[in-house]
Amino acid sequence: MADKQYWFSEQEFSERLRRVQASLHQQGFDALLAFMPESVTWLTGFYTRAYSSFQFAIIPREGLPTVICRDVEAYYLDTTCCYPDRVMWSDSDDKTTLAVNAIRSRLGESPCLLVEMDAWPLSVARFNGLRAGLPKAQWRDAGGLLSRMRFIKSAAELTYQRRAARAAEAGMQAAIASALPGVSEREMAAQICSAMIRAGSDLPGPGVMSSGERALHLHGGYSDRVLNRGDTVQIETIPNVRHYHARFMRPIKVAEATDEDYRTVETLIAIQDAALSEVRPGVPANVPDEIYRQGVLSAGLRETYTNKTFYSVGLLLAPNGGEPLEAAPGSDWRFEPGMTFHTYVLARGFGMSETILITHDGIERLTQFRRQLFVSQ
């Protein structure tokens, strides 16, 4: 028998299940079909790096969940999932038929179902096949039910995010040390990834990384480009521990910086400080969001400012890079204790960002790296 390797206590998993089942009772549904990989892992503990294969969890209104997945994942079910019921398919099986039979055997011919219809692994063809196999069932969109529950992090989840923050800091230190004239972006990325893995990250990253002209554009990735004196390097280190994320950005110049570079970064830091000073429970998200936008525009650092300024982070499995809670013009939500965000400001190729926790009276910076323009030596 494989040793259990639960990411959280059985009590924490039981509490998560209780909350979901209470919602099912309240709304009058028989079960939730959880297709988002984060939902399956958060509710049952089951994690395999092959989560892109067809898998989901049946969460009944009463009783214990059932996990449906590929048979070669049996070891990971045994070691990470805290619930025993499973249905496993092999590569020669008709997966839709197997899934229909699993639902029918546990919920009957005509269950009233909530379904994570926005889950990327649930294709239109697969969903239509499930509906055709259970024509008497009722199917309703679960919307953001589980995402909303995951916005508030437990103490155990925050432990993983704090550890990820330390790995992010190790990666940033490596970025600064390696950003030298004549060094390629690829070599710089290797140094960053190595540092983050050694510091505890489960995946290497490095995250957003680009230099020269591409540093002026978000979401660059490393290439064979060689750094030149005076280059700007845009860098965001993105490690995770148990796939719980923390990340941040710092501006780097290669070997030299101008007075204007220093003034720009000092302005960005002041804008971010002003925005974060307003963040506390009950404050509308559009309050600090507006401070960010107007600060950048009034300083003349950009002609427009269209990107979001906060987005929730926590348990994230690729391709997801953030949880669906963001601050942008028109946002109507408020900060609550236990939420965690990546919050950032960008201008002229320079990025300044933090991962923060909303506390009962303000924020805690989970990332604690020095806040300045770094010039490599």
Image (cartoon, rainbow, N blue to C red):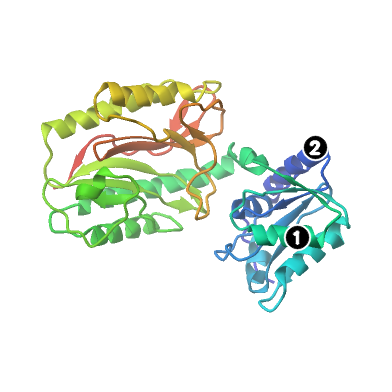
Residue drawn where x is 68% and y is 61% of the image:
126
Alpha-carbon neighbours of circle 1 within 10 Å: few (<14), some, or many (≥20)?
A: some
Which label sits on residue 282? none
Position of residue 280 measured from the top left corner of the image (x, y, whole percent): 50, 23
Number of residue marks: 2
Position of residue 327 measured from the top left corner of the image (x, y, whole percent): 48, 31
Query: Which picture quadrant has residue 263?
Result: top left
Give the mark toward the camera: 2 or 1: 1
Amino acid type of the residue that numbered disc 1 sits on in the rendered structure:
Leu
Pick the residue in front: 354 or 368: 354
Residue drawn where x is 39% and y is 46% of the image:
166
Position of residue 58 measured from the top left corner of the image (x, y, whole percent): 75, 55
Does the CB distance between marks 2 and 1 fall below 8 Å? Answer: no
- Residue designated by label 2: 27
Position of residue 125 measured from the top left corner of the image (x, y, whole percent): 67, 61
- Residue designated by label 1: 130
Pick the residue in front: 305 or 367: 305
Pick the residue in front: 50 or 129: 129
Residue drawn where x is 68% and y is 45% of the image:
12
Q: Secondary structure at mark 1?
A: helix
Ranked by sequence position, the earlier of labels 2 and 1 is 2
Q: Secondary structure at mark 2?
A: helix
Alpha-carbon neighbours of circle 2 within 10 Å: few (<14), some, or many (≥20)?
A: few
Please say if 97 is above or below 259. below
Residues at marks 2 and 1, CA–CA distance in whole angstroms: 22 Å
Q: Is residue 103 visible?
A: yes
